Image (tube, rainbow, N blue to C red):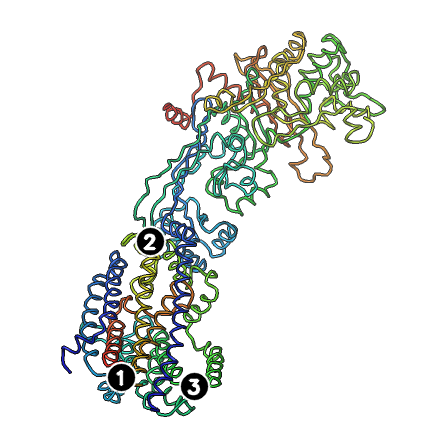
């Protein structure tokens, strides 16, 4: 592989979309944190993460995804190991033992493990031959590949991150092919599992779900955050109040402004125009991923990109839906926008995978 | 080939996924469109409510002075602890739990205060503690970050400088009721309004107009900036009353702990110089948000301290009624001053024996002697000759049995009986024997102390009735309020009649009569005592309640009087012993002030020094 090839075949459009999102994210993270005494230099730190992410994106894009796939058994085992280490010796932040500390950096290994799981599931599904519909054994095997790390993350317990793993499996099974009956049975099992799981959920998780069903019921409790988010977005109007001028943001009525609710800051300060730009770019990235999957040279490339697509579709829909009250509240970040080193790194590496597949795409 | 087919199948499935993605993104964009374009104004309003906090700047109530610029109702600085439910990060339970220790109030108490206002809009603050101490204020300010929903509000608070003195005239204030809010659109929730006395009658004069200041606050309730649209509060108008604190105190002091009332009028103008009702209460307790228990104690007190006896206690006038009757007799040419009656101590009318208060009898008495010695037999005969309707007509004309029109709430009209009244109200023919009772002010007849003062003062002033007022119309006009002139009535009464009754009343005080105790050297005091039997006496078992009501009504000087005093001591015994000394204290103080010999106590001196400032 020559460096010149990388340069020529590189998906500059996708990369450009990511850079614009990152730039807007830096501005609004700065806007959201400049008044806070607790989050100093957040935008600067985000910039460092983005730079590191760009480097890793290029590294992954330069690699052949087949090479990565070949290394997947030990990468997967290493991922399991890190998750076990986190469970044993990790740092607890807001109730979840999901962080490990490396010198000056705090890191959420579960985010990186996602990328590994994407490739692992893709490799398993791509190696099945002459299969129109998956049989039960194959479904269970694919489920295990995804399920072991998911179980370890669930034990932290980090419900939000746990469920972000599920789209990898879900989209993989759907595209690989399952019988409609199997799909129905799986959905029924999932629905039946909800009341069984209910008593095992924490109080704040139950509150989030009940508040999603009835947000006006308790504006002071957990419904408060989504309500403030809707006020911020609605008050922004079509063109926004101007950067650094959103009262909901600047006067700190918005909760977790620089992380989960960053889109509410965009909505307030940049208005519908700003939100449309962000959603347009995210939509572009998702459709680019779909296009890349469709034109992938082989099944491994196809399933790899679809795994990435599944994860970030879910991130986007859940986070965007949450800030306007369409989805229940979870701590799932908005890709390329929310502050957070681990998720930024994971997202850039995942996009590196997409670009890697696209470079070797099937061309008529 | 097969491999290629399989890849094609997978690719076709991806094509289906892309439609799903487009649909989901469309729904999300639609959600933002709804919030940001369709409902934007609504949310912009909510955002403003979040960030802009309106602070009420409470206007000071107008002060109330006596006629000599002595301060009766003042204001002092105070702080309220208020609770705003809107945008609170805490639940009500959490807030209450945090405040129980900090404010030293019970959770039930706090809950009750909040529940009472449960239906108010959420932005409407609820007062949790009125007149909070410095400890409470410090606690709330120290916890502003965790509890932005609880804050401190400045409020000038009523201070009645003389506490219980003249409490019934001044009245008291309290939080506006829901009914008042409905009826008076200029009132706002949490306003303090007059509930009784002058505070109620002149509420619109005294009440100021609250201002407001709008501040931008952040999520923790910290004020970031003040908006420039501050509306300054406009204080209420000060009122100078006709009361004379020295006379008021003189009367209150002598009545002491007894149950009764006193009214001091200037019959020339109707100005009320003193208005006493005992027992009294401290209106300051109402100013700092009286507790339910404290209020109930006042209501349950058998002596009813909240009743303004000066205008609400309707009692048989006893012998003071003889003055009116004597005038009625002379004016109707039923008797002359020279006619006389022989008093044997008892006489039979309509088959029943009526006794004089002096069983031994007064012998031969004319009008002068019968008034000076309060002979009952003379007036039984006069009453019989007059008949109830002539008595009734003259009494009513003289100001009894109807409201005086005093500028205080809740005045009683009393009762002057007549044949038609008996027919109309009691549905029986008037029994003639009742006239004998009424002719000495007993039985089915009732007057209030203020009526007694108005009627006797009016008669002594030649039939001129000036509506009694605590605040004169010119005082209201000075403050820019419209006010009709004082209602004035004149009835025809001959000079000779006035001279005859006034002279006799002078005799009561100065010629060995029943009220010599009321005498003031150099000041021609005239008066009449009354001792009214308690109705249904037999039904009372307790000692004090069996006692008669003691009356005294007097004026001075006896020709062209400047001052008239009426005193009622309920269950006080004889008018001459129980009531007349109160009047004496008033006349004495008035005369000393008039002649420049009044020496107020130390407190009075300080008060007068302070009131020098205009």
**Quick one: A287 or B483, which is closer to the camera?**
A287
A139 or B311: which is nearer to us? A139
- The image shows residue B554, relative to residue A2, as above or below, that is above
Residue position for label 1: A79
Image-quadrant location for residue B512: top right
Q: Do marks 1 and 3 both belong to one polypeptide chain?
A: yes
B537 lies left or right of B457: right
| Cα distance in 3D space between marks 3 and 2 | 45 Å
* Subunit of label 1: A
Q: Position of residue B381 (x, y in %)?
A: 78, 17
Q: Secondary structure at mark 2?
A: loop
Distance from the alpha carbon under mark 1 to that under mark 2: 44 Å
Dot label at residue A239: 2
Q: Residue under circle 3?
A: A178
- Depth order, front residue of B30/B481: B30
* Quadrant housing the C terminus of chain A: bottom left
- Tell me which label, 3 or 2, sits earlier in the chain: 3
Q: Are marks 3 and 2 on the same chain?
A: yes
Q: Is residue A353 left or right of residue A264?
A: left
């Amino acid at each position: 592989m020559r460096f010149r090839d990388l340069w020529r075949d590189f998906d500059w459009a996708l990369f450009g979309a990511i850079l614009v999102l990152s730039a807007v994210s830096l501005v609004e993270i700065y806007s959201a944190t400049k008044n806070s005494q607790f989050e100093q230099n957040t935008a600067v730190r985000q910039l460092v993460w983005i730079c590191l992410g760009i480097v890793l994106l290029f590294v992954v894009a330069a690699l052949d995804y087949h090479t990565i796939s070949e290394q997947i058994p030990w990468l997967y085992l290493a991922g399991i190991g890190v998750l076990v280490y986190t469970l044993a010796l990790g740092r607890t932040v807001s109730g979840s033992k999901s962080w490990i500390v490396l010198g000056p950096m705090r890191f959420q290994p579960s985010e990186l493990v996602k990328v590994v799981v994407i490739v692992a599931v893709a490799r398993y599904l791509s190696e099945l031959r002459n299969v129109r519909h998956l049989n039960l054994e194959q479904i269970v095997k694919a489920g295990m590949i995804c399920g072991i790390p998911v179980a370890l993350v669930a034990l932290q317990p980090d419900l939000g991150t746990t469920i972000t793993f599920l789209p990898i499996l879900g989209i993989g099974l759907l595209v690989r092919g399952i019988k409609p009956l199997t799909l129905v049975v799986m959905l029924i099992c999932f629905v039946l599992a909800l009341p069984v799981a209910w008593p095992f959920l924490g109080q704040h998780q139950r509150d989030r779900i009940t508040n999603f069903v009835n947000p006006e019921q308790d504006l002071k409790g957990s419904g408060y955050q989504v309500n403030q988010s809707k006020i911020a977005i609605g008050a922004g109007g079509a063109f926004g109040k101007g950067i650094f001028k959103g009262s909901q943001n600047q006067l700190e009525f918005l909760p977790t402004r620089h992380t989960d609710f960053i889109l509410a800051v965009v909505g307030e300060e940049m208005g519908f125009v700003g939100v449309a730009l962000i959603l347009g770019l995210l939509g572009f990235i998702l459709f680019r991923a779909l296009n890349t999957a469709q034109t992938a040279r082989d099944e491994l490339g196809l399933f790899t990109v679809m795994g990435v697509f599944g994860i970030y579709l879910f991130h986007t829909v859940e986070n965007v839906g949450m800030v306007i009250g369409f989805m229940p509240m979870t701590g799932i970040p908005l890709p390329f926008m929310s502050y957070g080193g681990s998720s930024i790194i994971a997202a850039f590496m995942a996009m590196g995978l997409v670009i890697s597949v696209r470079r070797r795409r099937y061309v008529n | 080939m097969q491999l290629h087919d399989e890849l094609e199948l997978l690719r076709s499935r991806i094509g289906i996924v892309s439609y799903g993605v487009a649909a989901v993104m469309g729904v999300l964009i639609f959600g933002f469109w709804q919030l940001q374009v369709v409902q934007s104004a609504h949310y912009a309003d909510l955002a403003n409510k979040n960030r802009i906090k309106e602070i009420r700047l409470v206007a000071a109530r107008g002060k109330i002075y006596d006629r000599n610029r002595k301060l009766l109702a003042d204001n002092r600085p105070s702080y309220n602890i208020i609770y705003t439910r809107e945008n609170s990060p805490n639940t009500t339970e959490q807030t209450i739990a945090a405040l129980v220790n900090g404010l030293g109030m019970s959770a039930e108490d706090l809950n009750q205060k909040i529940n009472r206002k449960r239906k108010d809009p959420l932005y409407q603050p609820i007062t949790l503690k009125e007149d909070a101490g410095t400890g409470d204020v410090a606690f709330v300010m120290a916890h502003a970050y965790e509890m932005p929903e609880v804050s401190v509000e400045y409020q000038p608070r009523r201070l009645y400088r003389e506490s219980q003195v003249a409490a019934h005239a001044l009245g008291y204030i309290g939080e506006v009721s829901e009914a008042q809010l409905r009826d008076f659109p200029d009132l706002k929730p949490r306003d303090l309004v007059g509930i009784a006395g002058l505070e109620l009658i002149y509420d619109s004069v005294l009440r100021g107009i609250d201002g407001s200041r709008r501040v931008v606050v952040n999520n923790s309730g910290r004020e970031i900036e003040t908006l420039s649209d501050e509306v300054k509060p406009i204080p209420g108008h000060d009122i100078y009353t006709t009361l004379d604190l020295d006379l008021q105190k003189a009367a209150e002091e002598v009545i002491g702990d007894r149950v009764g009332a006193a009214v001091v009028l200037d019959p020339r103008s109707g100005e009320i110089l003193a208005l006493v009702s005992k027992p009294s209460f401290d209106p300051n307790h109402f100013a700092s948000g009286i507790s339910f228990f404290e209020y109930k104690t006042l209501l349950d007190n058998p002596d009813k301290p909240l009743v303004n006896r000066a205008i609400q206690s309707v009692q048989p006038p006893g012998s003071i009624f003889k003055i009116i009757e004597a005038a009625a007799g002379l004016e109707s040419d039923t008797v002359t001053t020279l006619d006389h009656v022989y008093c044997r101590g008892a006489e039979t009318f309509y088959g029943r024996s009526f006794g004089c208060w002096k069983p031994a009898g007064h012998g031969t008495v004319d009008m002068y002697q019968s008034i000076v010695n309060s002979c009952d037999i003379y007036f039984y005969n006069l009453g019989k000759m007059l008949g109830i309707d002539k008595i009734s007509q003259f009494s009513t004309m003289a100001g009894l049995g109807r409201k005086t029109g005093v500028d205080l709430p809740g005045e009683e009209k009393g009762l002057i009986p007549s044949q038609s009244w008996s027919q109309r109200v009691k549905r029986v023919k008037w029994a003639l024997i009742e006239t004998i009772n009424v002719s000495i002010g007993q039985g089915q007849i009732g007057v209030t102390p203020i009526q007694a003062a108005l009627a006797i003062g009016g008669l002594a002033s030649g039939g001129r009735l000036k509506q009694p007022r605590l605040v004169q119309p010119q005082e209201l006009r000075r403050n820019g309020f419209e006010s009709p002139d004082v209602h004035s009535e004149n009835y025809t009464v001959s000079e000779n009649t006035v001279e005859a009754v006034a002279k006799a009343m002078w005799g009561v005080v100065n010629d060995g009569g029943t009220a010599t105790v009321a005498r003031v050297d150099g000041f021609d005091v005239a008066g009449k005592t009354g001792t009214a039997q308690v109705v249904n006496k037999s039904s009372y078992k307790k000692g004090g309640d069996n006692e008669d009501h003691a009356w005294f009504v007097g004026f001075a000087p006896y020709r062209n009087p400047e001052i008239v005093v009426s005193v009622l001591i309920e269950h006080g015994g004889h008018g001459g012993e129980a009531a007349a000394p109160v009047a004496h204290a008033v006349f004495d103080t008035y005369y000393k002030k008039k002649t420049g010999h009044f020496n107020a106590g130390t407190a009075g001196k300080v008060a007068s020094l302070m009131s020098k400032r205009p």
